Amino acid sequence: MERKLASIRIISDLRPIEGADKIELAIVDGWKVVVAKDVGHKVGDKVIYCEIDSFLPIKPEFEFLRKSSYKKMADGSEGFRLRTVKLRGQVSQGLILPLSLINYTNLDFKVGMDVTMMLGINKYEPPIPAELAGKVKGLFPSFIPKTDEVRCLSEETELITEDGIKTIKEICETKYIGKVLSFNVFENKNEMNTINSHSVQKNNNDWYEIELISGKILKLTGNHRIWLPELNCYREVKELLGDEVVKITD
């Protein structure tokens, strides 16, 4: 299941940005992307939407990204990494590009069409830290969402295990190695999976609280990813708009 890093989408809304005359906010499938006003985007326009962590190749049409986005991957390849940024106080998630960048004649641009390969875009993989060089066996599986940062749930979070409900703190302190209830996004079902490691992280003060309709509150770090079944993708907690439908195993 390859991730569509760049695909054909439709601009569903355009909103002004307070105090900004040259930029505005475009909404694409729930994502907020800052765009230049002089491009002349309109609601209903088909565009290329590039997701966060897209690694764009070194090409003249992408050189405007060099100052903010230039990176080099572990294999030495150079390019421009897209990540969440703030422009004039507004969060921007990803990049919108014109269809004209794809030089294929008589191509029918259907909504949802994957154009990742056409644009030479790859998934950004951070370089291996020097202290780990020589200790890494192969690449991280492409089908498992990951970042180069630690993602956490708070220690009081309760998980359903094969031995009953346990908090993360209890699981870590007792080195519990039983199975916990998980959600398989590829088969769309709940399943029990065995815990294969334990890790306690220092408090980084980057905590967010999510209140569910049921009244249940989850406490997670801002970079923790939540599965959004309606969009069929993960999104970091700090990027949630507040009205998404999220998948919680119960």
Image (spheres, rainbow, N blue to C red):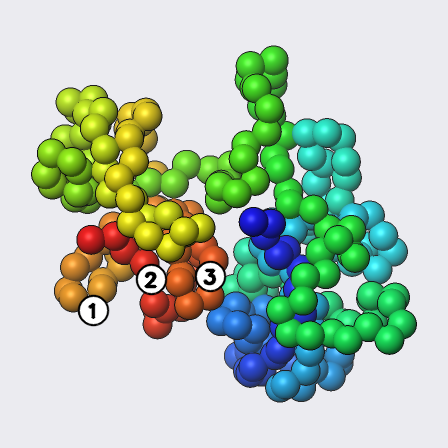
Identify residue type, mark 2.
Val
Q: How many marks?
A: 3
Residue 88 appears in the rendering: no
Q: Quadrant of residue 25?
A: bottom right
Q: Nearer the viewer, mark 3 or mark 1?
A: 3
- Residue at 27% x, 55% y: name it: 248
Rounded to the nearest angstrom, the CA distance separating label 2 from label 3 is 10 Å
Mark closer to the chain start, 3 or 1: 1
- Residue at 47% x, 58% y: name it: 233
Residue carrying label 3: 232
Q: Secondary structure at mark 3?
A: loop
- Residue at 33% x, 40% y: name it: 152
Identify residue type, mark 1.
Ile
Residue carrying label 1: 213
Residue 29 appears in the rendering: yes
Q: Secondary structure at mark 2?
A: loop
Rounded to the nearest angstrom, the CA distance separating label 3 from label 1 is 20 Å
Residue carrying label 2: 246
**Residues packed near mark 2 inside 10 Å, few (<14), some (14 to 19) or many (20 plus):** some
